[in-house]
């Protein structure tokens, strides 16, 4: 098997995650889909690392994980406070951006 | 042969890829399409574990373990906590409200996937090196060497980022109390002054199978009383309405009991 | 000697500045300051005149360059004065008559609390008028031209609390604007044609210029002259200008400012000489105005308005003469000077009569005043004899020459037409002036009680008028009679002094050039005809007004009389043609602006607005929609990248 297949898998997962972001209204699920996209990227990075025979890809993936962790912390805090004020976790309810 | 080795992996790994890859894609799809958030979270956790296995298979031992510990162990659990706060059982309607959004999303996702796959297919390497040499001193040691030399500055910055995120989360969720909390005495005095609900709130309805707090207690005429259910559940709309169900159950029970006792039905008796 | 020229302008200008900025502390002395400074100007002018007489005829021109006003490459405008025989004539007339009228105004305006301001305006007028006649280029002349317009406006509207005076001032200003526009266009044309507007270079290079351009410039100058000198078709303001105080009417609207048009045409003689078509236009304008003013003068019962019609008519004579070319320039100026004397005298006399009659202006309410105001009667009578052109009074010497010149043109037809008009004008002049004379000084008393000042807004303020009181005609104070006497001397002798031996013509000849007219009939015949015609006019007036009692209320009169009372319908004409036409033009322009211009602009705005409204729907506020755009954009970027790599 060619390890490029890992990249194809990563692309597929990324597209699925992106579609999820676009169609789901529950902010928590949207967030999960974003995590899925990040993980897809990580998989691609790890596969690249193996192909190129150096560890830089893994380092980048590691940093991605750290950033994702920070993002989750803040994002979930936002969801909680949003729910607290609106009693809803739907992203469509926060539609005050329109006129 | 060496040429071939540069292109392929072992058969075992291939088998593992195809099996687990399929499962991962299914898990991802379930994440997107499950109605309940808690199901989505569980499916995502499964996908992440499979990804951890793939990391390990790709020679990223440290990342594989970190994936399991941090992602599956910490982040997904955080998600579950929030899901619990927001409402475990609340199911989303999957009906689309924005016109054309679903089609556009599907088009974008599909188009993106096709583009990426096509792009990767075009750009695929002629050969691949494997991590044998890079991992010769151990994967963790290799990573640590890079992290504390070449990427030390970025590493320090991520530390700052994490601190900031922690502070930010606290700031976002913290609510400053602007006035003194009222004592129990003051609360009872207020109740007397307002003249409603002098006694404690009524207990939730408890009936046979259902002794949970999400069942409204029934008033003498059989209608449920909203007051008996916790305020949070009420606002989430998670009250389980058993009034008709309970009455039907009651009727059925009476029916069965009378059948067993072979009593005549009231209307038959009147005949 | 030439350094004194600036002093001529500076003295009255200083007076105007001091009087207008000085404030109330000058109320007691202001009129004397103004009069003395006017007299200073006259004395300086006299000194320069004596100096000029001592030189040869060709060396008499003096120039004084004060400073470079607008020094731009290719555009040189200087503040420089030129004093030649023509300017000298005007300087003496302006400062002389001006000083006399200053003196007269001291008595006439005695009771007016704004007398200081009045003298400030008078001095301002003198300064502007002197600037006009002393300028050595058209641009500086234009400054003076506008300056006298401003002074005229201020003085016509001096009693601005009277709505009629305020309106008259505005009317004069507006009508003058039309003429001023002609002058400014003429100056622009001069600049494009000659590259300069100094008199010398412009007037010397006219032979090298095309006749078409000269005609255009000349017609624009004629328009300017029409505006300033109240010639048809811009004549309508002069009658209303009589709302101003009488000394103003005498100085500005009889003797000096209204003759500025004659000065302009005479000064620009070289241009007109090169444009025969324009000269014909000038002659026509002069002839038409001559009759127009005379007819209006016959019908007016208001003494000042009758005199205003007469002024218009006499200036028509001057314009007619000026349009004849070198044959007539000198006679035009000569008539201008003699007219300056007798018309100023007549106006001052009229002012004196009004002064004695509680400011009554209707001649039908005078009558028999000769016993009560002997000095006024004599001076007014001498002015009358001068204006009708009876020999040997001054009007004869100048008017007769103009009639002679009018009979001496290129074609016989033109000679007979314009000569006939001039002759007829002389007869009508005699008629209406005799009428004024008889109505005012002869016949029985037709005095009426003084009008109620509340209902009669034309009463001049500051003069004690008791409603219902009969007037007590009395002779005016010395300060008013002295100028009248001096001007009466001028009316009697000026013509003879100028005319005998053609002194005046030779004096002006270096500036205006001169040709002897050759009339179609002999000079003695014309002179005799003129005298006969004027005697006929006098006799007719006597028959009509001297033999029969004059009704106090004017009879209805013939159609022509009624039209003449309304200034021959000039205002109706202006209203119908210009005002209505302007209104319609404006309305259609407004409509066009609303429908077409605004339509385009608003349509653009509406379409952009509508498009924005539709585009706004894209902004539905849903984060997911924005995410779709972002993701779609990212997909496009990837596609573009792949495409570029594939290429």
Image: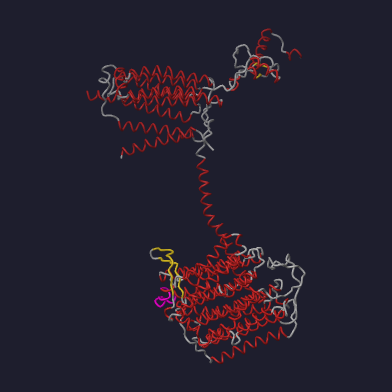
The image quadrant where one finds the N terminus of chain C is bottom left
Task: Indicate yes or no whether the magenta region holds residue C563.
Answer: no
Residue at 49 percent of width and 79 percent of height: C279
Residue at 77 percent of width and 70 percent of height: C469
Label count reads: 0
Task: Indicate yes or no whether the magenta region holds residue C210.
Answer: yes
Q: Nearer the viewer, residue A4 or C324?
A: C324
Query: What range of the chain is rendered magenta?
Result: C201-212
> How far across and down, in percent of the image, does residue A6 sit?
34, 25
Q: Nearer the viewer, residue C87 or B269?
A: C87
**Residue most extreme to the right:** C468
The answer to whether residue B1 of the structure is visible from this angle is no
**Residue most extreme to the top:** B261
Q: Nearer the viewer, residue C537 or C118?
A: C118
Left or right placement of residue C434 versus residue A97 in this view: right
The answer to whether residue A88 of the structure is visible from this angle is yes
Does residue B119 lie above or below B216 as drawn?
A: below
- Check the image and tell me how it is coloured: secondary structure
> How far across and down, in percent of the image, does residue C173 sit?
58, 67
Rendered image quadrant of residue A47: top left
Does residue C614 lie above or below B90 as drawn?
A: below
Left or right placement of residue C1 versus residue C376 in this view: left
Rendered image quadrant of residue C451: bottom right
Magenta span: predominant SS is helix
> How far across and down, in percent of the image, does residue C220 sit?
50, 72
Rendered image quadrant of residue B25: top left
The image quadrant where one finds the C terminus of chain C is top left
> How far across and down, in percent of the image, does residue C416 sit?
55, 87
């Amino acid at each position: 098997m060619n390890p490029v297949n890992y990249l194809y898998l990563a692309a597929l997962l990324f597209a699925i995650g992106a579609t999820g972001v676009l169609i789901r209204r529950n902010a928590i699920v949207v967030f999960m889909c974003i995590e899925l996209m990040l993980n897809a990227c990580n998989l691609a990075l790890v596969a690249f690392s193996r192909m190129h025979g150096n560890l830089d890809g893994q380092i980048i993936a590691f940093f991605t994980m750290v950033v994702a962790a920070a993002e989750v912390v803040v994002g979930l805090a936002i969801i909680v406070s949003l729910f607290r004020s609106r009693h809803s976790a739907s992203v469509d309810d926060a539609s005050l951006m329109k006129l | 042969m060496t040429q071939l080795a540069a292109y392929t992996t072992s058969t075992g790994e291939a088998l593992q890829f195809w099996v687990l890859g399929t499962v991962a894609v299914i898990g991802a799809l379930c994440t997107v399409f499950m109605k309940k958030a808690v199901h989505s979270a569980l499916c995502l956790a499964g996908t992440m574990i499979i990804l951890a296995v793939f990391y390990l298979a790709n020679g990223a031992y440290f990342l594989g373990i970190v994936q399991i510990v941090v992602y599956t162990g910490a982040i997904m659990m955080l998600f579950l906590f929030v899901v619990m706060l927001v409402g475990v059982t609340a199911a989303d309607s999957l009906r689309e409200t924005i016109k054309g959004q679903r089609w556009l999303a599907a088009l974008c996702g599909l188009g993106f996937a096709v583009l990426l796959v096509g792009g990767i297919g075009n750009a695929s390497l002629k050969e691949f090196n494997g991590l044998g040499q890079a991992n010769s001193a151990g994967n963790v040691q290799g990573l640590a060497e890079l992290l504390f030399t070449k990427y030390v500055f970025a590493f320090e910055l991520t530390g700052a980022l994490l601190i900031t995120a922690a502070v930010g989360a606290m700031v976002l969720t913290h609510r400053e109390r602007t006035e003194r909390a009222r004592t129990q005495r003051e609360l009872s005095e207020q109740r007397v002054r307002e003249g409603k609900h002098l006694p404690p709130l009524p207990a939730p309805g408890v009936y046979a199978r259902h002794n949970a707090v999400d069942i409204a207690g029934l008033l003498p005429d059989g209608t449920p009383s909203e007051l008996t259910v916790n305020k949070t559940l009420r606002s989430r709309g998670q009250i389980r309405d058993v009034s008709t169900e309970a009455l039907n159950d009651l009727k059925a029970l009476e029916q069965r009991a009378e059948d067993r006792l072979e009593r005549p039905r009231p209307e038959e008796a009147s005949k | 000697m030439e350094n004194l020229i600036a002093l001529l302008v500076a003295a009255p200008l200083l007076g105007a500045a001091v009087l207008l900025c000085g404030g109330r502390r000058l109320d007691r002395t202001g009129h004397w300051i103004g009069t003395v400074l006017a007299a200073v100007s006259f004395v300086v002018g006299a000194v320069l005149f004596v100096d000029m007489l001592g030189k040869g005829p060709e060396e008499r021109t003096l120039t004084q360059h004060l400073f470079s006003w607008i020094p731009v490459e290719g555009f040189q405008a200087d503040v420089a004065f030129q004093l030649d025989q023509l300017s000298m004539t005007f300087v003496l007339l302006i400062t002389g008559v001006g000083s006399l009228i200053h003196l007269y105004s001291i008595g006439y305006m005695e009771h007016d609390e704004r007398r200081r301001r009045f003298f400030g305006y008078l001095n301002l007028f003198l300064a502007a008028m002197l600037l006009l006649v002393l300028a050595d280029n058209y641009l500086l002349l234009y400054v003076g031209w506008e300056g006298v317009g401003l002074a005229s406006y201020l003085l016509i509207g001096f009693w601005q609390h009277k709505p009629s005076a305020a309106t008259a001032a505005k009317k004069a200003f507006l009508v003058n604007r039309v003429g001023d526009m002609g002058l400014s266009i003429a100056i622009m044309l001069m600049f494009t044609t000659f590259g300069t507007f100094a008199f010398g270079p412009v007037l010397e290079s006219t032979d090298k210029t095309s006749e078409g351009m000269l005609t255009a410039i000349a017609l624009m100058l004629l328009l300017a002259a029409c505006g300033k000198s109240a010639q048809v078709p811009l004549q309508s303001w002069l009658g209303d200008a009589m709302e101003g105080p009488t000394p103003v009417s005498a100085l500005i609207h009889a003797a000096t400012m209204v003759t500025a048009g004659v000065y302009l045409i005479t000064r620009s003689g070289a241009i007109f000489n090169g444009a025969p078509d324009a000269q014909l236009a000038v002659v026509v304008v002069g002839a038409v105005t001559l009759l127009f003013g005379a007819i209006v003068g016959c019908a007016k019962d208001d003494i000042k308005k009758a005199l205003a019609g007469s002024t218009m008519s006499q200036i028509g004579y001057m314009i007619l003469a000026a349009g004849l070319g070198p044959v007539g320039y000198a006679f035009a100026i000569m008539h201008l000077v003699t007219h300056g004397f007798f018309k100023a005298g007549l106006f001052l006399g009229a002012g004196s009569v009004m002064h004695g009659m509680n400011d009554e202006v209707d001649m039908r309410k005078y009558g028999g005043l000769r016993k009560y105001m002997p000095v006024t009667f004599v001076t007014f009578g001498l002015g009358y004899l001068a204006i009708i052109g009876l020999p040997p009074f001054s009007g004869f010497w100048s008017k007769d020459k103009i009639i002679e010149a009018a009979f001496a043109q290129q074609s016989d037809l033109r000679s007979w037409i314009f000569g006939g008009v001039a002759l007829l004008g002389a007869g009508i002049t005699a008629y209406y002036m005799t009428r004024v004379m008889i109505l005012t000084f002869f016949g029985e008393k037709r005095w009426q009680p003084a009008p109620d000042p509340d209902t009669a807004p034309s009463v001049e303020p500051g003069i004690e008028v008791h409603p219902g009181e009969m007037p007590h005609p009395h002779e005016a104070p010395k300060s008013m009679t002295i100028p009248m006497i001096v001007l009466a001397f001028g009316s009697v002798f000026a013509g003879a002094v100028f005319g005998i031996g053609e002194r005046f013509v030779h004096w002006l000849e270096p500036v205006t050039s001169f040709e002897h007219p050759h009339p179609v009939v002999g000079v003695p015949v014309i002179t005799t005809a003129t005298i006969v015609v004027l005697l006929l006019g006098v006799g007719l007036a006597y028959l009509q007004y001297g033999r029969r009692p004059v009704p106090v209320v004017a009879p209805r009169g013939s159609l022509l009389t009624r039209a003449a009372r309304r200034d021959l319908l000039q205002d109706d004409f202006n209203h119908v043609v210009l005002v209505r036409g302007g209104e319609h033009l404006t309305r259609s322009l407004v409509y066009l602006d609303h429908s077409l211009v605004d339509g385009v602009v608003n349509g653009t705005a509406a379409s952009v607005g509508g498009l924005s409204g539709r585009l706004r729907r894209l902004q539905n506020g849903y984060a997911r929609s924005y995410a779709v755009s972002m993701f779609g954009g990212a997909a496009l970027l990837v596609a573009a990248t792949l495409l570029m790599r594939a290429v």
